Image (spheres, rainbow, N blue to C red):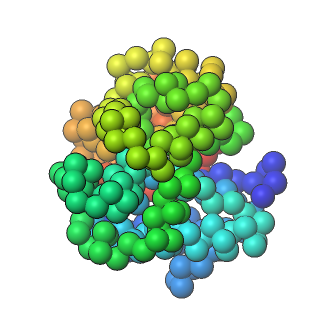
Amino acid sequence: MSPTSPIFAIGDIHGHFDHCAALLRDAGLIDDAYNWTGADAILVFLGDYVDRGPDGIAVIDLVMRLQTQAARAGGYVVGLLGNHDMLLALAYGFGRGVFYDWWRSAGGVKADLAHMADDHFHWLLERPVMVRLSDYLFIHADASFYTGYGGTVATVNHAIAQLITSNDVDHLADLVDQFGEHRAFLANDELAARLLKIYGGQQILHGHTPIPKMAGGVPDNTGRPYIYAHDLCINLDGGIYAGGEGFVYRVG
């Protein structure tokens, strides 16, 4: 990875392994054997690897493997934590109960939980919720909760990591609720500007809300980014779980 390394990002995959792999192949980032071919490129997964689709754990395994392979090749793969990923981790960690019920109601797939191992669990717990690369702030959700957990990228990631590894059920329930917010920047571009002022960057790139749900339900708007809030925000959720095209976006 170098200052001139190209940056790519992909939104919510939701267990659709084959679709994800095809998009990454088309972008020149992996080969037919799912091995990294991106050299020194940077690839950001915006979270929500699981739920709603058939192969959530296979998606996690792919991202984990690409992180190792990219690092050896001089590249860099970032995997952010999505709200569905957090719910799966909580369902695995707490067992049957309120978090299991929330996970199932959010589209949790029983096969994901059945095939999840401790290494998947710990990997999810270690995922950051935000990262800044160059002039871009990458987050999973178009939501307003981030500033409640710290004033820097590092402090937010640390605070949420500490919380999701705790037994503080009440505050975890609050986080689940906060992480489920949608369209916060669509209604309030001043909030987007505030996040960029606090955490740095010139644009926010996120997933979480499928583009058709943000763009007035236009079904053919799933193969390209949705830029809004006076160009402060770029939505990369191509609605793969609902039959959308999805895409790998080259940043900049």
Name above or below for residue 136 compared with residue 51: above
Q: Residue at x 79, y 50 (%)?
A: 4
The foreground one among 224 and 186 is: 186
Residue 78: quadrant of the picture: bottom right
**Rendered location of residue 239, percent (x, y):** 31, 51
Name above or below for residue 6 compared with residue 109: above
Q: In the rendered view, does 126 fall on the left or right side of 242?
A: right
Query: Quarter of the image containing the C terminus?
Result: top right
Q: In the rendered view, does 245 fall on the left or right side of 78?
A: left
Q: Residue at x 49, y 25 (%)?
A: 148
Q: Residue furthest top?
A: 190
The foreground one among 85 and 213 is: 85
**Rendered location of residue 56, percent (x, y):** 36, 68
Q: Residue furthest bottom?
A: 33
Name above or below for residue 223 compared with residue 201: below
Asked if residue 225 can be seen in this view, the reply is no
**Rendered location of residue 93, percent (x, y):** 37, 60
